[in-house]
Image (spheres, grey):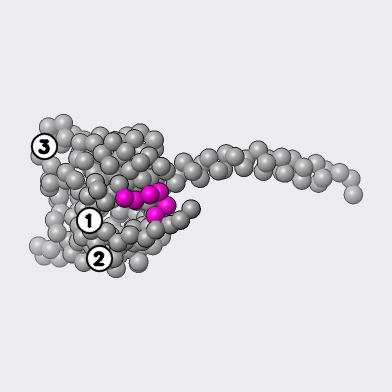
Amino acid sequence: MSITTHRMQFPLSREDALRLRAGDLVILDGEIVITAGLPTHQRLIAALGGAEPLPMDLRGQSMFHLGSYSREVGDKFKVEYINPTTSTRFNPYMPTLIRELQLHAVGGKGGLDSACAQALREVGGVYLSFLGGGCALLSAAVKEVIHVGWPDMLIHYRLVRLRVEGLGPVTVGIDAHGNSCFDMVREQAADRLEGIMNELAVDRAKAALPS
């Protein structure tokens, strides 16, 4: 499979998202929104239902499951580092957020389920897989904190809009056409499972023979 590297401006447009294919690499410039909070996702769903206003304009934004260590210095909010968190925790909420907010790029680590992939296909969006443990590389790309939403929440649960430069590379784990690297890996593993189990059975049988 041929892998292409793209350097793209964010928030990602639908047109740019549709250009990407599962397995491609992307380097990010521009603005992204991050959070690592399960309570944040629950609050977003409630806000979309009318419980309160959204803390910033999120329609068409690029939202990533990136944890952070941040601190408040006077009236400034400083992000010291960012690191991906597991996206599968947010599976119940992401289809609604993707559709209602028309998110053309979401991401984190570990992937999302088929319901999320279907929502991405409907709106023309991609899931970007970030390097786990790549904190130093990822954090160096953070240039500015633009806006902090819901300051009443714990710092790492807040919605934070960042300006980044050269963030990545990240992998297109799920593309806007419904193709998923995560599904491909699972299918390959399932195809190989019977052969692996047979080999193990032969090895066990040999080990049981008297010497």
Q: Nearer the viewer, residue 120 or 157?
A: 120
Within 10 Å of disc 3 (Cα), the crowding (few <14, some 14-19, many 20+) is few
Q: Which residue is mark 2?
A: 165
Left or right for 3, reference 137: right
**Amino acid type, residue under disc 3 in the picture:** Glu
Membership of 11 in magenta stretch:
no
Compared with residue 64, is residue 99 higher up or lower down, i.e. above or below?
Answer: above
Residue 52: which disc? 3
Q: Which residue is mark 1?
A: 10
| Residue 32 sits in quarter | bottom left
Under circle 3, the secondary element is: loop
Under circle 1, the secondary element is: strand
- The part of the chain drawn in magenta is 19-24
**Amino acid type, residue under disc 2 in the picture:** Glu
Which comes before the other along the chain, label 2 or label 3? 3
Q: Are marks 2 and 3 in contact (CB under 8 Å)?
A: no
Q: CA distance from mark 2 to mark 3?
A: 32 Å
Q: CA distance from mark 2 to mark 1?
A: 10 Å
Which x, y percent locates residue 13? 22, 49
Q: Nearer the viewer, residue 25 or 148?
A: 25
Which x, y percent locates residue 132? 41, 57
Which x, y percent locates residue 106? 29, 47
| x 19%, y 40%: residue | 101
Q: Nearer the viewer, residue 22 or 192?
A: 22
Q: Nearer the viewer, residue 188 or 112?
A: 188
Left or right for 24, reference 161: right
Which comes before the other along the chain, label 2 or label 1? 1
Q: Nearer the viewer, mark 1 or mark 3?
A: 1
Which comes before the other along the chain, label 1 or label 3? 1
**Amino acid type, residue under disc 1 in the picture:** Phe
